[in-house]
Each structure stands twice: as C-alpha cells, then as structure tokens.
Amino acid sequence: MSKVDRRIIKSQEAIKKAFIELMTEKNIDQITIQEISDRANVSRRTIYLHYMDKFDLLDKLIEEHIYKLRELCEVAANNTDYIDAVLLWFEYFESHYLFFSTMLTSKGGPIFRSRFLEFVLQELKNEENITEGSSQGLSDGEEVRIQFLGAAIVGVVEWWFNQEKPCPPHYMAQRVGALLEKNL
Amino acid sequence: MSKVDRRIIKSQEAIKKAFIELMTEKNIDQITIQEISDRANVSRRTIYLHYMDKFDLLDKLIEEHIYKLRELCEVAANNTDYIDAVLLWFEYFESHYLFFSTMLTSKGGPIFRSRFLEFVLQELKNEENITEGSSQGLSDGEEVRIQFLGAAIVGVVEWWFNQEKPCPPHYMAQRVGALLEKNL
DNA sequence: AATGATTTGTGAATAAATACACGAATTACG
DNA sequence: CGTAATTCGTGTATTTATTCACAAATCATT
C-alpha cells in the first residue's frame, strides 16, 4: 500500500493544510497560489506538479473526504446498526474539524455542501436498492423520501458545525441514528 | 541569507526534532538511526546525507545552540546591562525547552553540560579580557573567580530545568543579572 | 484607459531525497 | 556458543522538489 513516495505525501499534506488554513481566513477567490506555497513552505512549482489550480486542489480535497466517508459507509454496511455508522461519521468529522467546519459554514461557500448532499443521496439510494432488491428506477414516492432524508442529514450536520460542535459524536450518533432506524 | 535549499532545512529540522524527542524517551545508546528516520518520516539514507552518525547529529545540535547563545551574548555586549543579557538567555531556553531540559537533566547525560560550561567559561574570560584590557594570560586569582562564576551560572541553569521552570525568565534575569552585576 | 505591480503558468537545469540492494557489523536470544 | 534477526553504512539509479527565468495574464491604482 505504502508505495507512494513519501515526498509526495509530505508535499501534498503541507499544501492541503496550508490551503485549508487560508480557506478559514479568506474567500477562495482571494487566495493565491503564491500564498499557498509560502504557507506550505513549498516551491510554487511543486503545487503545479500536483494540481492544475486551486480549484483542482479543492476538488481533490473534497473527493478525498467523500471517499473516506464512503469507506466508513462500507464498513458500517456489514453491521446494520445505524447508530454505529453515524458515530463513525461524526468521529471522522471531529478529527477533520477544520476542513468540514470551513466547508459547511458560511466561509466555505456552497461547493462542498452540494457535493456532500449528492453523496448522501447516492448512499441513501444505494441503501434503498439493497433492501428493495429491485435494480430499476425509484418510484416518485421513494424519490421524495430520499430527498427528504438527504436534506435532513445534511442539514443536521450543517447545524452541528454552525453551532460549533454543541454535543459530542456519541450523542449525535444516538439521536440521528435513532431517527434513521425509524425511517429506513 | 536564505540561500539554503528548503529541502535541507526541512529534512534537518525533522531529523533533529525526532532525535530530541527520542532523547527524552531513552538513552542515546539505545536510539537507532532507523528509529530516527522512522520518526522523522525521512529516508534512512537522508540522515547519512547530513550526519556521520547519531553522535555527529548530537554534536551539530549542541554546537547550533551554543552558537545561538554566543550570538545573544554579542547582542547584549553592546548594552552592558547583564539583566537584559540573562533575560535573552532564559527566553531562548524557554523557546527550546525540550532540548535544554533533556540535555541538562538526568536523561541527557553529561555531554552537553560540559560543553555548556566550557562555553560559559570562554565568555567569562572574554568579558574579563575586555575590562582588563590585557590580552595576556589570567592570573591564578582571576582563574579561580572565573571557574567559580562559571560553575555558578551553569548550576543555576541546571537547577531551573531540574525544577521544571519554577519561575519565569524575567524573574531569573532579575536575580541572576543582579548577582552578575555584583561579581563582574 | 494607462501603467506598474503582482500573479500565473511553464520550461529547463540542478539539487536533494528516495527506494532498493548488498555485505558487514552488531545485537538478541535460545 | 551459534544462529537468526536487526541495524548499519554505502553504491546506484530514479523520482521528486527546487531554483531561476520569462512572457502572458490579472489586478490595483490612478
């Protein structure tokens, strides 16, 4: 697994860290590649070695986290306990608080929010197909329910970050998990 | 000034940091190059690129700090206020607490202590030659006084670290500075 | 709109770090 | 004591990061 050159890891880590920090301080439009390279203590050239531009960097960052969340879903798919699944999610949120907080509160803009919603809807439809068994399209009624639940999940996560983590992950897991159990 | 390749800086910083950390955990003899490279997240080869072995690494680390302390002495040599000079020292100690604490308490062994004393004696003799004016050897009486003061200074610094910083730098500056004023 | 400063994206040469392999030296341990 | 495992020190080829330079694009300020 660890076949990736450690220089690549270190450079990208530094770049992403610097970028997230800058995102908390200003809008993405007024962040310059120069600034990122300065903050990351990396040559400007190095950034272009890995990313097309700052939007590509943001994309990669987002996809990376979405990928990790999807992995957590697969882990939790074995045991059908929603509470545990939600717990994994919020623990992951907590361990990458700076990123998610930045991306889901006012500063981050709507880029991540819509991507996150899209992902949640995918997972919900996935779940639906498993229990339903039919691989054909969803009925209107099901679609409405999916949209309803997706908005609910994203909304409650947004609330959690907007309130600056008002309650711990295990509490959220308990409450949100119970709601999911009832609705799925 | 900043003509040194930033990769060198970063590698050496990582190596030195890892090494100091390991020094706090175990004796230098049972620290392996492998461990250092692992902790520093650097190739083992890279360490040999900069240092002969772990003792060379320790030497360079020590000399680096001695050099910085000498610089502080030169800065303070302009204004003859010993209190300010001592303040600069203890502020430097504080900002590199892990290193000095490790090297001056039981863990570090006597390597740094003797080097530190040697340096302090040099500075004292230097000071003496300036006020004395004569560039010839010191009399026995002067030599005794130098040794007396050197031991006192090193001793009080050791005490400060052994007690885990029982009082702030400005307090130490006040007290030790006053004692130096009286004796120099 | 003009212009002066900054940022950008890229090419090219160079330097540094890395992976990998190897025999020798050292250490751990039965 | 013997031997298995680890660490060491080094050679070498390769990959990555860096510096530097430069023209184009963007931005800021007038």
Image: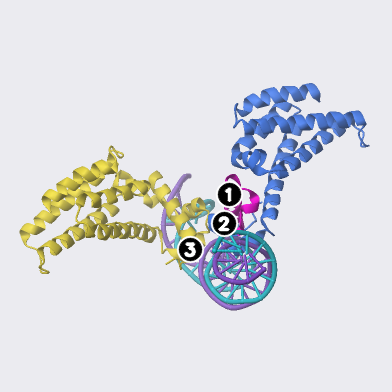
Chain colours: A yellow, B blue, C cyan, D purple
Q: Is residue B8 covered in magenta?
A: yes
- Total number of numbered discs in the rendering: 3
Q: Tell me, yes or no, whether the two marked residues, 3 and 2, touch with CB atoms within 8 Å.
A: no
Measuring from the top left, give residue B95's x and y in whole percent.
60, 38
How packed mark 1 is, by other alpha carbons closer than 10 Å (few <14, some 14-19, many 20 or more), is: some
Instruction: Name the N-terminal-most of marks 1 and 2.
Output: 1
Q: Dot 2 falls on which chain?
A: B
Q: According to the image, label 1 marks what residue?
A: B22
Q: Which residue does the numbered mark 2 point to in the structure image?
A: B35
Side (left or right) of C2 relative to B7: left
Residue B32 shown in magenta: yes
Q: Secondary structure at mark 1?
A: helix
Q: Above or below — where is B99 with respect to A147?
A: above
Mark 3 sits on what residue?
Answer: A8
Q: Residue at x 87, y 34 (%)?
A: B129
Q: Would you say B55 lies left or right of A79 here?
A: right
Q: Is residue A83 found left or right of C17 in the rendered image?
A: left
- Label 3 sits on what residue type? Ile
Dot 1: chain letter: B
Pointers 1 and 2 in contact (C-beta within 8 Å): yes
Q: Amino acid at mark 2?
A: Glu
| Position of the N terminus of chain A by quadrant | bottom left
- Under tag 3, what secondary structure? helix
SS at mark 2? helix
Judging depth in this view, the residue of A183 and C3 nearest the camera is A183
